Amino acid sequence: MATGTRKSPVIQVSPRLATPEIDGFIDELWVQDGLAKNTLESYRSDLELYAGWLATQGCGILEADSQALARYLAALSQRAKATSQRRVLSALRRFYRMQLAQGAIQHDPCILIDPPAVAGRFPKTLTEQQIEALLDAPDCDTVFGLRDRAMIETIYASGLRVSELVGLQFFQADLNVGVVKIMGKGNKERLVPLGEWALEWIQRYLTEARPQLLKTPNEYIFLTRFGEPMSRQMFWNIIKQHANECGIDSKRISPHVLRHAFATHLLNHGADLRVVQLLLGHADISTTQIYTHVAHERLKQLYKTHHPRAEL
């Protein structure tokens, strides 16, 4: 079929790859719906680019699951507007519904995928370098600097909500095992690992700083200068102060941005979307999928590493 004129350019995120499944799908659309040539070519382009990207991941178009599809949409989001992304997802939905109806696949990978977010919905986050700078900002030779470092390490290592962080009590934390037990939204309990770095700083804070902050006995881990539990606003002010000290725009930072950084950096390093969902305590995976757009750097690196014609 000859290439028709498109109203928008092809979104080139991978080499195009024609497959028998795509050819069959386009033929079925032509027979069943009588779509115009340009519309059929638009479907073909979207599907062949998707198939080409899957090939760079060592995956066939009928083997792809929702994880692969989410990562493709993440890569696409760097080059296409939300309207173009929705068009692509619409093509993929029709394609996989047909494959499911024909018995070519057992599960529809689109079933868990919501339409891409409109511009501006993607969460603010920080780079790994900015996180390192923020962690190094507190003066850990002081009681308050040691407390601040332990709190920032904890929220970045665990992805806790700020209310969960400031409300953390000793009965929730098993520092020997390295996990905290969190009662999140909807009274849903989850276990969250802390990681060795966070554990080290928490232990140091508990040994060197908290005894100096404690006025009257209580079970809260992180305390103010008055020996009381930290409030959300207090912690917000703390990280803004340290952001200014290390050259990060304080308008771009909040406790929730550190939660975003936790999620996006996990995905950048290859974490499974379902695992991130469990760690964050999201009831619906579509909430977690807003973070997948940041995985594009890892995808680009994988492509450069593994595709024979990625670079000259």
Image (tube, grey):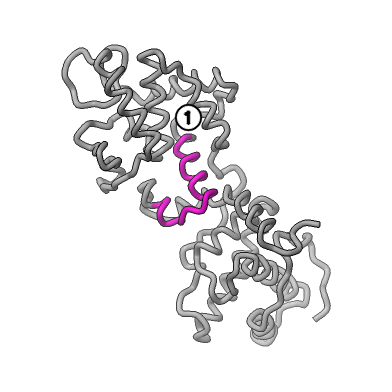
Q: Which residues are magenta?
A: 258-277
- What quarter of the picture does the C terminus occupy? bottom right
Magenta stretch contains residue 271: yes
Camera sees residue 33: no
Side (left or right) of 134 relative to 224: right
Q: Position of residue 248 (x, y in %)?
A: 58, 25
Q: Position of residue 16 (x, y in %)?
A: 73, 69
In this rendered view, identify the residue nearer to me: 99 or 87: 99
The amino acid marked with disc number 1 is Ser
Residue displayed at 66% across by 61% down: 306
Camera sees residue 231: yes
Q: Position of residue 261 (x, y in %)?
A: 50, 39
Label 1 element class: loop
Side (left or right) of 267 relative to 296: left
| Dominant SS type (magenta) | helix
Q: Which residue has dot 1 on it? A: 254
Residue displayed at 16% across by 19% down: 217
Residue displayed at 54% across by 59% down: 70
